[in-house]
């Protein structure tokens, strides 16, 4: 959570920059901004990892409700200055917009779930973070033999989905198999591929209704820091077939781990970790999970390969950590070799 005095500074900057028709209210780790002269209000939330989540809503006439809030903007800000700039620009651009009626382009969630089942999607879920803030963004996956565009084609005429009497902005996001998981997501449908349990559309419909009706909070964003030795051991205990670091996607600020494990299992193991400590230095964590082929570590910084070791003994882990330390000591080269070539 951000220091309260920092959020108070954000509040003061907004009050100084905005016209006096806007009110700015600070409540612990959240700032709300609204005005009586325009049908719009905004919220800036502080997460435990220091990021700021900025959302804006337009109050619309919808389904007989006067001025129901509909999401119009969702932004992640990495600094106080960025959040202030977003708020100022949003206030100025939205203050002159007219009221909007959304009755003509609303679809009930039942029809959305039905459409998912009748397409080639083998997986579908909505982000808890987005759903809690008014965005119904469907993350879905279609196998290479299927038609990716079918789901969007069926629902293309709709902009808003109704869930438990509330409007949610409808969006679509096709994901690769490496991102097929339910971590921090509400499951809508699964055929049981890529290590997931099968989820019927009936169960998906019940899950999303329950999340909205109970005003459930999303799982907190990852904020924990872990020592690299512990991280590797946890992944091996989860039966990872291989672990490496992608040199082309790693630098002095972040490390990208490639792990041969299903994304569903991978995110359950490491989802709460945002940073890793190596030799006293802290790095942001990025992940690539693979459950289709491999492991293939020849182009990576090799850390662990189940096919070349009898078991996850301390000696094998130490060798992988030595490779990672060499990579760091060589100042993060774009390619990495365990052994230097001999000069004849």
Image (cartoon, grey):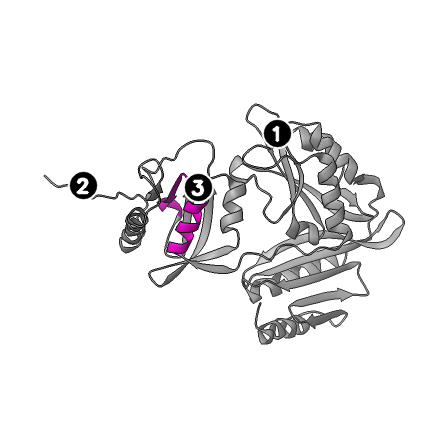
Residue 268 position (above or below residue 297): below
Question: Any mark on residue 341, and which?
Answer: 2
- Taking depth in this image into account, of 275 and 74 the one nearest to the observer is 275
Question: Any mark on residue 298, and which?
Answer: none
Read off the residue under disc 1: 148
Circle nearer the N terminus (1, 3): 1
Read off the residue under disc 3: 239
Give the structural element (helix, strand or loop) at label 1.
loop
Q: Position of residue 39 (x, y in %)?
A: 80, 58
Question: What residue appears at the point 84 percent right and 55 percent down from the top-left corner?
Answer: 67
Residue 265 position (above or below residue 86): above
Residue 238 lies in the magenta-colored region: yes
Q: Which residues are magenta?
A: 228-249
Residue 145 position (above or below residue 193): above
Number of marks:
3
Q: Residue furthest left?
A: 344
Q: Is residue 34 left or right of residue 30?
A: right
């Amino acid at each position: 959570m951000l220091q309260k005095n920092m959020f108070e500074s954000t509040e003061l900057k907004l009050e100084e920059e905005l016209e006096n028709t806007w009110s700015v209210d600070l409540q612990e780790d959240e700032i709300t901004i609204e005005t009586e002269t325009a049908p719009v209000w905004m919220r800036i939330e502080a997460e435990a990892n220091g990021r700021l989540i900025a959302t804006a809503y337009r109050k619309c006439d919808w389904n007989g409700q006067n001025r129901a809030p509909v999401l119009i903007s969702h932004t992640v800000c990495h600094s106080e200055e960025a959040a202030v700039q977003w708020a100022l620009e949003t206030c100025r651009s939205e203050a002159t917009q007219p009221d909007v009626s959304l009755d003509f382009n609303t679809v009930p969630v039942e029809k959305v779930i039905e459409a998912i089942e009748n397409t080639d999607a083998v997986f579908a879920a909505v982000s808890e973070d987005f759903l809690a803030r008014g965005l119904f963004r469907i993350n879905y996956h279609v196998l290479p033999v299927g038609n990716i565009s079918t789901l969007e084609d069926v629902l293309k005429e709709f902009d808003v989905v109704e869930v438990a009497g509330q409007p949610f902005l409808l969006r679509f996001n096709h994901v690769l198999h490496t991102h097929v998981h339910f971590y921090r997501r509400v499951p809508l449908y699964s055929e049981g591929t890529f290590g997931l349990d099968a989820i019927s559309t009936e169960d998906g419909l019940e899950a999303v209704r329950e999340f909205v009706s109970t005003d459930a909070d999303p799982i907190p964003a990852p904020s924990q820091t872990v020592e690299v030795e512990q991280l590797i051991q946890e992944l091996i205990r989860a039966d990872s077939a291989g672990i490496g670091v992608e040199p082309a996607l790693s630098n002095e600020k972040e490390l990208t781990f490639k792990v041969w494990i299903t994304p569903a299992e991978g995110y359950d193991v490491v989802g709460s970790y945002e940073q890793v400590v190596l030799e006293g230095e802290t790095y942001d964590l990025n992940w690539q999970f693979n459950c289709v082929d491999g492991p293939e570590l020849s182009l990576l910084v090799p850390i662990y390969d189940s096919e070349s070791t009898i078991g996850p003994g301390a000696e094998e882990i130490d060798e992988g950590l030595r490779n990672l330390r060499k990579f760091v000591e060589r100042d993060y080269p774009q390619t990495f070799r365990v052994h230097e070539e001999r000069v004849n």
